[in-house]
Image (cartoon, helix red, strand yellow):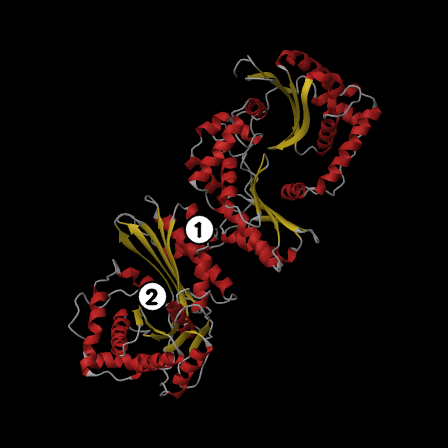
Amino acid sequence: MWRQPGRPPFAFLGRDGDGRGVVALTVSTEGEPPEGATALSGIVEARLSRRALLHRVVPSWDFVRASVLVTSPEEGALAADALVHALQDPLSPSEAGDARPKREALATRRLGTPELAVHARCRGEPFATVAATVPAELAEPRLEALRRSAAREGRVAFGAVGGPALRRAVEGVLARGPAWSKAPPLRFSLGGKGARSYPTDGAVVVHVALEAPTGPGASRAALALGAPRGALPALAAREGARIDGIFGVAHLGAGCIDLTLELPDGATPLQAARLAAWSLSEAQAALGVARTEDRPPPPPDARDAAEQAALFALSDDGEARSRPGSQVTLGLPRGRPAPLDLEGELSREAAPPPPMDLRARAEPGQSEAWMLVASPCAAEDEGAADAGLAAAAVTASAAAARSDDLSLEPWITPTAIGVLAHGAARPGEAGKAHLRRLADAAAFAMGGPPTSRAAAEARTRLFTSSATDEGRTRARLAHALSPGRPGRFLPTGTEASLARASDEAIRARARALAEGPLRAALLSPDLEASREVADALARYRLGGGHVPCAAGASPPLRGLLEVPRSAGAELYFATAIPSADTRGAVALDALASLLGPGLGHDGSLARRLEARATLIESHVVPFGDQRALIVRVGTRPSLVDEVLLASREVLGGIGRLPDPVLEAQLRRAEASATSEGMDPRRRLAALFAGRDLAAPRPRLTAAELRSAADRLFAATALTVVVGRPGAARP
């Protein structure tokens, strides 16, 4: 930046490949209506035309931008001289008519309502504001006063794009030229904070304008706000709104950010106020980050780049504003008045949401950070008719929000439904930036509804899985273990519930998930940067708080239940205990280990069933306020009754196994629990649930395990589901 006393600043951008160099001028008419900049642009354009220069002159609300293409340093010096004299030379009476063509053109550009003038000014878009008719010409004294007011140090800046020789040529012209009188201090301002509304013919529109300390900061913040996977698009999508425009514009001594969003028909004034408050908060957040960033990249067109460089030279006066002004304007259909206290409503909606329950643990030396944002209540909230909607929502959201260098996965368990994000830092990336990127990815996936296409693909994927023999058998088990709320055990939903699900219902479920309650768990090599995670979650307005989940379902159904299959046969044996029973949990783990495949001790399922079983699985499933031991056995349809009888005998005979066998399974279960911490997903799940994997587990004796087996595998405690061809439909 070239600066000399009594001379306008000169910003130069050195680059090759544009074909021609450019010399540009910007002049501020701050304090004048847009007719002033338009009239002055007509004078400047006419003077450059008389010099036969290849030029462009464009007025905005409060600026005139002029640029001249040049092919050599000598032409650059001539262009700079012409621009200087276009402003500094007094106006002759014969030039008064030069302003008329542009003023006539401006008169055809009229705002639909005066309430939008502040936003047009923020964007720098000129609109007629003074009179509906245009006189033949402005009086020469008025034009001359306008020129003298603008042609001062502090109102004018020069810019150029080209090589070093062009730079020296322009600097020489400015240094040798006449001195410029200094303008009194003045800077762009929105005039404090304000809120208003105007009537529309049906549309619901939100306009937000926010002052920025500098023009580059406004431009950089607008780029951040427009990022397709940022907080603003997620917030707008949650309200069903569309972003019509995001502008970051430089003005004299400042900048301005302007946002326009349109809500769907039927949106209420309170919805519009909420979206306006969220948008303003997000613009303020983006502006806070932009203050520390470099200037935005220059435009590819050399003329735009030179004009932008000159404009930025006038938009940064080095003075910070403690209270930047903002203006919110709501366009509401006639008959839907704005809230009586619009400013109060905006303040209430702008208040930060309740902080999310963020559970973090440092893991120094790990190569990746892991983060889970999920609802602990999603499966509890769904009944038989809508089971699987939350799973479909997060499946669609994770697919739509995929990242190049982060892994995003749907997390679907009976106790948490959400999104898992994990990944390593980029080369040279600081811990704060890494965690902010991770949190932004997870929060974006949870914060906005997926597209209809993504919702349809997720629903199809889940429905296809549920509409199988295995899916129908598991659904029957889910209905038995959690009557009326099968999703508590089977969060991916049932064939019946997914067949009824619509794309819009999935999108609505995603919006409901974002409202909370949500919880976050974070495993990070560096917890000093965890504040970035909390800030990101707050920006996406994800629901926090500690709202208890819905009440539990009815008691499980016991006894034998059947479900038809097209081929093959499966048997499920299930028994459950309350989640709070810690000693019972140890017993379940030991029994799952004892009944699992590959164990050939006397009395095991594998030894007893031998070739009659095509599959043996056993595992523990926490769901709702219970923990269930599930034993799954596959067989041929002709052997179902034999396998059922033999399996019952094995389960009922566990209590008669010798102590060494039971003690071995207790040790095996303890070793398995100890190795659980080797998997970061298991560590994250435990952190989310509030379990300490390092905490000592209760130690059971063989007698206690025997007693637990007798109780859990009693005929009155077992739920048995048999799937085979020809079975009666439930």
Q: Amino acid at mark 1?
A: Pro
Instruction: Determine whether the residue tagged by mark 2 lies in a helix, strand or loop.
Output: loop
Horizontally, residue 710 falls left or right of residue 272, namely right
Residue under pointer 2: 124
In the image, residue 644 above or below residue 458: above
Q: Amino acid at mark 2?
A: Gly
The part of the image, by quadrant, that contains residue 265 is top left
Q: Position of residue 257 (x, y in %)?
A: 40, 62
Whichever of labels 2 and 1 marks the residue nearer the N terminus, that label is 2
Residue furthest out toward the left: 136
Q: Which mark is residue 555?
A: none
Q: Which mark is residue 233?
A: 1
Q: Position of residue 421 (x, y in %)?
A: 58, 46
Relative depth, front residue between 530 and 222: 222
Q: Is residue 523 shown to the viewer in this render?
A: no
* Within-10-Å neighbours for mark 1: few <14, some 14–19, many 20+: many
Quick check: marks 2 and 1 in contact, CB under 8 Å?
no
| Real-space Cα separation, disc 2 to disc 1, in angstroms | 24 Å
Instruction: Determine whether the residue tagged by mark 1 lies in a helix, strand or loop.
Output: helix
Relative depth, front residue between 576 and 254: 254
Q: Position of residue 499 (x, y in %)?
A: 46, 27
